[in-house]
Image (tube, rainbow, N blue to C red):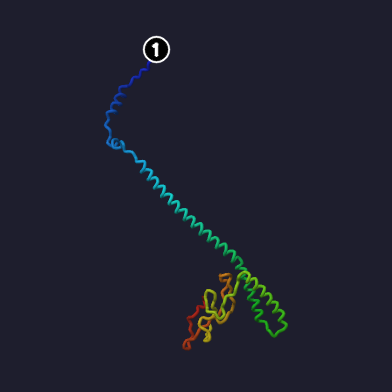
């Protein structure tokens, strides 16, 4: 028995549509686009330039981050060093009050009173031990008496007319000042000299409210 043949009947309308499509004019844009291929070399060069620009941006960003990290490490190191150096600052500042009282006690004792000498000797020994502790923690007195007035280290309590001293010279010390390393722990409270000019005191030498 012979195989059956598949008969395909195309509709008349389909034939007409195909005929119209084949006869349709080719648009001008389609003609222009034919053969207009992208140059692969120029495309690679553009991509390479973009990649290099991006790599340069990442490199600059990395350098900035590295510099910021280095600055952060240095700043943190300085802060830690300051914390280590000045950790006992408040305690030592309070200890200075004890030193003041011991020094006043020794200064007020009468050298002629033999009964006080034993007590004064004990106070002097205590003061010496405390001074050793202060020295161990790098606490040193501020130079004041006879030195030029320096508002960074001295606090002027008053002025005194003196013709035997240059103007702005510390002529009296009410309370010692102290440094801890290179930081001022307490300013020295002082009296500052002022000279007279033509019998009239010079009033504009030192601001005692500083």
Image height check: is 72 above or below 98?
above
Q: Nearer the viewer, residue 21 or 1?
A: 1
Q: Where does label 1 land, which residue? A: 2
Image height check: is 13 above or below 56?
above
Task: Indicate the position of residue 102 as horizontal and vertical percent values.
Answer: 66, 76
Instruction: Identify the residue at horizontal 40%, vertical 14% (top origin).
Output: 3
Instruction: Identify the residue at horizontal 73%, vertical 82% (top origin).
Output: 115
The reply, left or right, for residue 53 in relation to residue 11 is: right
The reply, left or right, for residue 124 in relation to residue 71 is: right
- Total tally of numbered discs in the picture: 1
* Residue 24 appears in the figure: yes
Quadrant holding the N terminus = top left
Task: Indicate the position of residue 40 as horizontal and vertical percent values.
Answer: 36, 41
* Residue 189 appears in the figure: no
Task: Indicate the position of residue 13 as horizontal and vertical percent values.
Answer: 30, 24
Extreme residue toward the top, this view: 1
Q: Secondary structure at mark 1?
A: loop
The reply, left or right, for residue 139 in relation to residue 19 is: right
The reply, left or right, for residue 93 in relation to residue 68 is: right
Q: Nearer the viewer, residue 160 or 70?
A: 70
Instruction: Identify the residue at horizontal 45%, vertical 53% (top origin).
Output: 61
Q: Quadrant of residue 106?
A: bottom right
Q: What is the crowding at mark 1: few (fewer than 14 residues within 10 Å), some, or many (at least 20)?
A: few
Task: Indicate the position of residue 10 as horizontal and vertical percent values.
Answer: 33, 21
Image height check: is 17 above or below 94?
above
Q: Nearer the viewer, residue 133 or 6?
A: 133
Extreme residue toward the bottom, this view: 199
């Amino acid at each position: 028995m012979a195989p059956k043949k598949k008969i395909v009947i195309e509709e008349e309308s389909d034939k007409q549509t195909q005929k119209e499509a084949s006869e349709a004019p080719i648009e001008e844009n389609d003609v222009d686009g034919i053969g207009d291929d992208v140059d692969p070399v120029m495309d690679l060069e553009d991509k390479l330039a973009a990649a290099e620009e991006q790599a340069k941006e990442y490199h600059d960003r990395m350098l900035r981050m590295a510099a910021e990290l280095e600055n952060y490490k240095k700043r943190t190191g300085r802060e830690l060093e300051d914390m280590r150096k000045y950790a006992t600052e408040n305690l030592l500042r309070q200890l200075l009050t004890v030193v003041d009282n011991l020094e006043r006690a020794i200064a007020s004792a009468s050298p002629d009173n033999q009964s006080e000498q034993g007590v004064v000797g004990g106070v002097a020994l205590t003061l010496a031990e405390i001074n050793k502790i202060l020295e161990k923690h790098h606490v040193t007195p501020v130079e004041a008496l006879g030195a030029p007035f320096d508002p960074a280290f001295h606090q002027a309590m008053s002025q005194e007319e003196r013709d035997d001293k240059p103007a702005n010279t510390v002529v009296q010390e009410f309370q010692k000042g102290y440094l801890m390393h290179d930081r001022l722990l307490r300013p020295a409270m002082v009296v500052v000299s002022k000279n007279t000019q033509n019998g009239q005191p010079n009033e504009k030498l030192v601001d005692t409210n500083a």
